[in-house]
Image: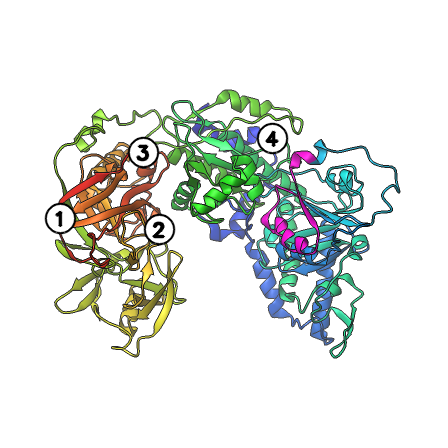
Amino acid sequence: MDFQQLCTFETFQQLWSHYGYGENFPDVIEQEFTRIKGITYLDHAAATLYPESLVRDYCQDITGDVYGNPHSHSPSSTLTHDTMERVRFRVLQHFNTTPEEYSVIFTSGSTAALKLVAESFPWRRQAESQAASLFCYLTDNHTSVVGMRGLTSSQGAVALPVLPRDVEGRAKAAEAPGEDAVCQTAHLFCYPAQSNFSGRKYPLGHVRGVRARRLYPACDHRGRWFVLLDAASYVACSPLDLRDCPADFIPISFYKMFGFPTGLGALLVRNDAASVLRKSYFGGGTAAAYLPGEDYYVQAANVTDRFEDGTVSFLDVIAINHGFESLHRITGNMHNIQQHTFGLARYTYMLLSSLCHGNGKPAAHVYTEGQFESSVTQGAIVNFNLMDSDGQIIGYSQVDRMANLYNIHVRTGCFCNTGACQLFLGIDGQQMRRNLQAGHVCGDGVDQVDGQPTGSVRVSFGYMSTFEDCQKFLKFVAECFVEKPVTVDHARLRKLKAAPAAPEGSGEHPSMKQTNGEVYKVGEEKPTEASLKGFGFRDSNSHGGAYTLTAIYIYPIKSCGACEVHDWPVGPQGLLYDRGWMVVNGNGVCLSQKREPRLCLVRPQVHLSSNKLLLRASGTDAVSVPLKDDAQLHPGYRVCQSRVCGDRVETVDCGDEAASWLSDFLGQTCRLIRQRPDFTREMRKKPIGAAASTSLSLVNEAQYLMINSASVALIHTLMSCRRDNREGDQLLDTQNVISRFRANLVVAGEEPFEEDNWSHLIIGSTRFVVAGQCGRCHMVGVDQETGTKTKEPLISLTAHRKGKVTFGVYLTHEPPEGSPPAASGLLSVGCPVRPEPRCA
């Protein structure tokens, strides 16, 4: 059975029978989630999707009734209070407990709930007669849990990180009752019910084991042990029974369960543990009595009243009721959700971890403790990195970029779980510090440092996920990252189908597979070096004719069409007037072709002699703005701020005429703004040899982008080889390919991608430093002539470069010794180009 046959619903049904919630499941999904048609949403662990009936019923509710502030006593306020109490009861009912056992404290989310515990827990400092309180947490905890130590340490508690294997691995026999009655120091143990990194489910029995001091670290330390169970990830797709798992504190976020509302969570507190929490701050509604002139305060008797400072977001609380209604109407219960989502995750894991390149090497490395044997031990999360046919990791940013092109929504990075990231990727603390020194911070796109991955890719499923989501994702991986022909490790697949549950901690590491490669038809011979020689592909030791500058392009308005020139002045920020203007939406946010492809149909022209920038587009009259302009010449033009690639830039609005023209053409409110002449934006990472002060216009990374026509020719050939794979797409000509990469300078080189190894080059009399490679985004898929989107040439580029989606190099000026940093001069088509290779 080949990969295509494995990617069928019939095969899925053979592997897992618990799919959907009845025969009408496809119809319900189509009715409730019409807005995601054409989207493959696989980021439910971050935020799940809300059904349309939830919002519709909620809007009908709040528009049909008057809900007042619950702290008042009017009829509308009483309605709010009673509705909120009903919601509290329904929350407890969902977790199989009662108001006699637990209280529900509404917060802004699970992070706020964690912070509330950290601030209120009775931490004790070290004293002669008493040990200090311990704040213990599994290393596989979310950042928001680990971050509690910032508060606990300041109050004298000792932070104790615990490896997951040590909880049971270092357990001891329980002491006789009463042996630790002398020590009343309170300790807190925090662990996730489900890892948000790998989806591993930790035993809920840890709650009783730690509280009874049978498990580590409680077995090594006397005192009163409390347990915080971080259930935010777990409860999205799994049932939680608090009678079987009586944790003291349980933080949750409702948007992970229902998708709406966001910004609302809760702390579930066991009433027996609530009395130990101590509160300093008191907001409106939390005091039974206080005196403003004296240090006199009596807290409210009710737990929820005591800890909900001010007026809670009561309209959002009302939405929770509709969340439960829609959840149960669509799915029946949480057990059904658990079975449905686990089946999708298990199927994805089995195929992804069995997927191989044509040479037999695995295409993915999946990060998991087990083999997805049971929904009791594994949640609906698959975390992995892809690998090329040489076994090298493909950076997660490259995978994310290609997924965006296919409208597949995934999550990449470390997922706010550094401990799990370190464990699975083998990154020690010293390496983490080196990564930071190299410029990598949490949440950025730096996916590798010194050849080592800094994070991974995560796909996660929700109750509305479908088999088609799995199918599209797996086919995307095979098409974009697997060297053809796609193969499957059938021995491994058979083993996964029949594998019994392995004992926890057995140490067996599942073999993983990954995909990368060149995108050709299955069974098709990939082009060889010999077959590509006619397109400029030469032996790496070949050094032939001269290099020349064959084309110069400026892009006066960022993300708009190109203006080809033959001779052009070089200014202090790059080519004169290149990316000097940009289009912003009604909120002042920069528009790019990623969101508005029709920007490429706006064709600006620079007329130096008449000091005008002309905006042209087919079917419209041209409009002009002055080239040399500032706020003093036009006091009516407002100065504003915007952002380019995270950098703050100061700009000047170019007036209503241009704004009206752009708004009419693009069909949305727009403004044209330009960078203030007196504003300087510095390049973030300056290469060795660049000017000490390298200022930028509104470009993304560097002053210039250069591509090699030999590289373009190779990409064009690769596209020709896979033309039959494309559904209805016509083969792009070479010039169209060049236009999509939107370079400033096109050089006729000798070998494809040889520019990757250049350190400097001289064009005419101007010397440049190579500042790095350009990581291509899916904007390359916009046809610059029509404004339509396609997947080429990015797929062929990704396939050939084995997932490393870079093409073209950034350049900056290298001023002659003793000269000012501001560049000047002239570039002309036909200028000789002299590259200097990087030293080995």
Q: Nearer the viewer, residue 251 or 548?
A: 548
Badge 1 marks a residue whose secondary structure is loop
Kind of residue at disc 3: His
Pointer 4 with pointer 2, Cβ within 8 A:
no
Indicate whether residue 602 is drawn in magenta. no
Q: Which residue is mark 3?
A: 800
Q: Can you identify the residue that label 2 sits on?
A: 685
Determine which residue is flagged by label 4. Answer: 370
Residue 149 painted magenta: yes
Percent coordinates x, y for residue 458 in the rendering: 51, 41
Mark 1 → mark 3, Cα distance in angstroms: 32 Å
Report helix, strand or loop for mark 4: loop
Of tags 4 and 2, the one toward the viewer is: 2
Tell me which numbered mark, 4 or 2, is placed earlier along the sequence: 4
| Marks 1 and 2, how far apart at CA | 26 Å
Does the residue at mark 3 contact the one at mark 2 (Cβ under 8 Å)?
A: no
Q: CA distance from mark 3 to mark 4?
A: 34 Å
Q: Which callout, 1 or 3, points to the residue nearer the camera? A: 1
Crowd rating for badge 4 (residues with CA inside 10 Å; few <14, some 14–19, many 20+): many
Which residue type does callout 2 highlight?
Lys
Residue drawn at (61%, 41%), measured in percent from left and top?
140
Q: Earlier in the sequence, mark 3 or mark 4?
A: 4
Residue 764 image label = 1
C-alpha separation, residue under disc 1 versus residue under disc 4: 61 Å
Mark 1 and mark 3 lie on one chain; the one further toward the N terminus is 1
Residue 714, x across and y down, in percent: 23, 35
Q: Secondary structure at mark 2?
A: loop
The percent position of residue 805, horizontal first and vertical second, equals: 34, 40
Q: Which residues are magenta?
A: 137-166
Residues under labels 3 and 2: Cα distance?
Answer: 28 Å
